[in-house]
Amino acid sequence: MAKGTRYAKRSKKGQPLWLLAAAVAAAAALWGARALGILPEEGQPAGAPVSQAAQSAGETAPDGELRVWYFDVGQADSELIRLPDGTSILIDAGTSSTEDELIDELRSLGAETLDLVVATHPHADHIGGMAAVIDALEVEQVVMPRVSESDTPTTKTYENLLESIADKGLSVTPAEPGEVLLSGGGATLTVLAPNGEDYGDLNNYSVVLRLTYGEDSFLFTGDAEEESEQEILAGGLELASTVLKCGHHGSETSTSPAFLEAVSPQYAVISCGVDNDYGHPDSVTLEKLEAAGVEVFRTDRDGAILASTQGGGVTMTALGKTAA
Ligand SMILES: [Zn+2]
């Protein structure tokens, strides 16, 4: 997305403090977020039952086309899945520096209501813009990984997200491998990870999702690294996908050879910033993809990327860099 006008920071003023504290405690209960210092000893899980996705009002694709946008949010991640019936699923929301542009983009795509928002893991390049998205749009359900007490972040970014979730009266559904988060209209969204409970590294908690539609499929990996990839392989769930969003911005710590072979994608998407400080994507990852004959799309070069399918083959479109 273009670097647009920055707007005034969102504010929580006018909200009674006790309400905020109670709401944050409720949202945090799932996580065992004692690090925030607000959780009672016996926190009650507050996950909402996972059910058929609600039907969104708004733009639909009568041609039976499913679309996935991989937004250009710099050195960060954000994807929108739009089912033919208008159901909208947001996976990650980039950093706070692109939140206004992301919200504008979601509105312009008709995704005023997000049936499902998935925070793959609580790092700022994935959840930094999510509080603002939840504040601005209608959200039906939020899914996050269950993170161990010792790995639970104490960042303001994470707290802001929990506050926004609570402010909207939402609870958080923890991601469980094998669980079908959504099924309808020919599309199925299944959780593949996280499979472990204590990684010592937030990346490996990433919620990994596989979306199928007709003959096509999409794998969304967050920042999952090799440890999680091996667990996914061991879990035995169907993994092959037409489009792979490479884990951890194309870092060499993800897209391990066995995982890539099992996914066997036709296309790969790497979400990373222009000249980012991490050297993402790693040349090792690019070489692996090239050797496997995978066509690579990169948000740092291609801008936002649109994948569309009617179930019989995916068309990839690089939407181009927007002038800064
Ligand atoms: Zn990341």
Image: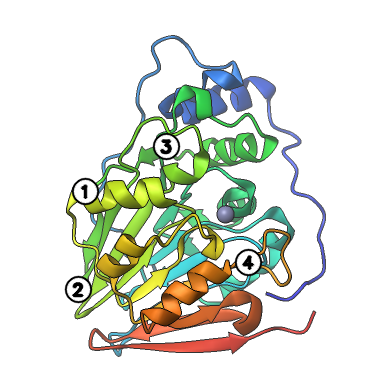
Residue at 44% from the left image edge and 51% from the top image edge: 225
Q: Which residue lies under the disc numbered 3?
A: 171
**Helix, strand or loop at mark 2:** loop
State ligand 1's quadrant.
Answer: bottom right
**Helix, strand or loop at mark 1:** helix
Q: Residues within 10 Å of mark 3 (few under 14, many from 20)?
A: many
* Marking on residue 186: 2
Q: Which residue lies under the disc numbered 1?
A: 234
In-front residue for pair 71/112: 71
In-front residue for pair 106/316: 316
Q: Could you tell me the amino acid type at mark 3?
A: Ser
Q: Are marks 3 and 1 in contact (CB under 8 Å)?
A: no
Q: Is residue 136 left or right of residue 226?
A: right
Where does the N terminus fall, quadrant-wise?
bottom right
Q: Which residue lies under the disc numbered 4?
A: 102
When the figure is inspected, residue 151 is found, relative to residue 160, above or below; the finding is above
Q: Residues within 10 Å of mark 4 (few under 14, many from 20)?
A: many
Along the polypeptide, which appears first: circle 1 or circle 4? 4
